[in-house]
Amino acid sequence: MPAAICSSCANIGRTSFEFDPNHGTIDLTLGRTVLDADPAALHIAVMTDEAGSLERLETVVAEHIKRFAFREELAFDWKRAPAA
């Protein structure tokens, strides 16, 4: 699934991406998204240098994946990483 999602992100805007069947990265102007698939779930991490952009990036990624997987019932459970 990461490969298909990464490929479909080309229409979001300025993007670069790399992927294999179980892992992918997408670089947008808002920040970076990392996708890792296992048999049970698709794990998504979003990172940005601007704290104010994090919620926007989460929204952009979630909306795109929901459109991509419209036949699936998806739930996003975003968790904040502890501050370094």
Image (tube, grey):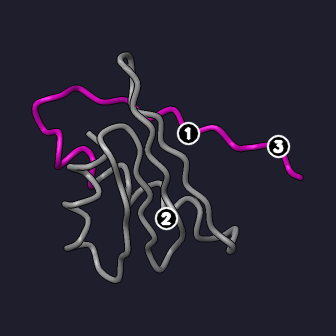
Pair 3/2: label in front: 3
Query: Eyeballing the image, is 25 above or below 36?
Result: below
Classed neighbour count for the residue bearing mark 1: other residues with Cα under 10 Å, few (<14), some (14–19), many (≥20): few
The furthest residue to the top: 40
Label 3, label 1: how many angstroms apart (C-alpha)?
A: 13 Å
Question: Magenta residues: mostly which secondary structure?
Answer: loop
Q: In the figure, 72 relative to 5: above or below? A: above
| Secondary structure type for disc 2 | helix
Q: Are marks 2 and 1 in contact (CB under 8 Å)?
A: no
Between the residue at mark 3 and the residue at mark 2, the CA separation in whole angstroms equals 19 Å
Amino acid beneath label 3: Pro
| Residue drawn at the location 47% of the way across and 80% of the way down | 29
What is the C-alpha distance between the residues marked 2 and 1?
12 Å
7 up-or-down from 13: above or below: above
Q: Residue at x 36, y 37 (%)?
A: 22
Nearer-the-camera pick, 23 or 32? 23
Image x and y of residue 1, in percent: 25, 39
Horizontal side, residue 39 vs residue 1: left or right: right
Which label belongs to residue 78?
1
Q: Earlier in the sequence, mark 3 or mark 2?
A: 2
Picture coordinates of residue 15, whole percent (x, y): 36, 76
Magenta stretch, residue numbers: 64-84
